[in-house]
Amino acid sequence: GAVVSQHPSRVICKSGTSVKIECRSLDFQATTMFWYRQFPKQSLMLMATSNEGSKATYEQGVEKDKFLINHASLTLSTLTVTSAHPEDSSFYICSARPLGANEQFFGPGTRLTVL
Amino acid sequence: DQQVKQNSPSLSVQEGRISILNCDYTNSMFDYFLWYKKYPAEGPTFLISISSIKDKNEDGRFTVFLNKSAKHLSLHIVPSQPGDSAVYFCAARRAGNMLTFGGGTRLMVKP
């Protein structure tokens, strides 16, 4: 299947700092990538849809100024958590859909812990 | 409003028997349904999918059934293996290719 990578896999940061998470589609191109967040024992919640070359579309309740998304190429999208707070601690997962495919393929996720 | 629901948070099955995971949805605009398997601290892995124009799709030990009139889909795993133990999410696709996920069902396959 198609491979999606995320970096870093784990990050611990101090409150008030910014953290960047990268999502890459390794063997396919994706005009659209998605960013999800998962709290413990809960389902995946879509945060935003990242479109290559244009602004991301954010889901209701997600602060676009706090969660900055950049989709600079057909294989890379980044999520930057700005001025992180402990309540931003979560498991962040990206996904990408190959051109013409129906399925989305997920990255391995990034565990963010804000102290 | 939870548009995709998995009403069983957990399921325990004996190795070799059939596992049946259920999913209900409310939005008739969903046109594609997918099942993902997820281990702790990992991203979901795509398992199997079905288009809304079909009622069954089979891939090895995994079969997905779709009942559009009941807005219900199910994933059958037979025979179940201990390595199948994980959380299973059903997802439904809507406009813009966004997926809406159910809450997940934790499957435990006992040796």
Image (cartoon, helix red, strand yellow):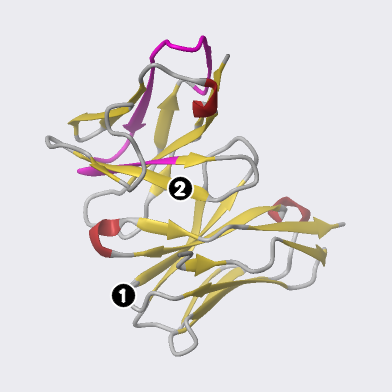
Q: Residue at x 38, y 74 (%)?
A: B27
In the foreground, B68 or B37: B68
Residue lying farthest to the left in this orientation: A53
In the foreground, A33 or B48: A33
- Residue B49, located in which quarter of the rendered image? bottom left
Q: Residue at x 55, y 58 (%)?
A: B89
Left or right for A69, reference A43? left
Kindly identify which numbered label has been placed on residue A45.
2
- Give the Cα separation between the discs numbered 2 and 1: 19 Å
Q: Residue at x 72, y 53 (%)?
A: B85
Does residue B97 lie above or below A38 as drawn?
below
Residue under numbered circle 1: B29
In the foreground, A99 or A111: A111
Q: What amino acid is at disc 2? A: Met
Dot 1, crowdedness within 10 Å: few (<14), some or many (≥20)? few
Left or right for B89, reference A33? right
- Residue B88, located in which quarter of the rendered image? bottom right
- Chain under label 2? A
- Chain under label 1? B
Residue lying farthest to the bottom in this orientation: B69
Q: What amino acid is at disc 1? A: Met
The stretch of residues the image draws in magenta is A9-36
Left or right for B108, reference B64? right
Q: Residue at x 20, y 43 (%)?
A: A31
Q: Quadrant of the N terminus of chain B?
A: bottom left
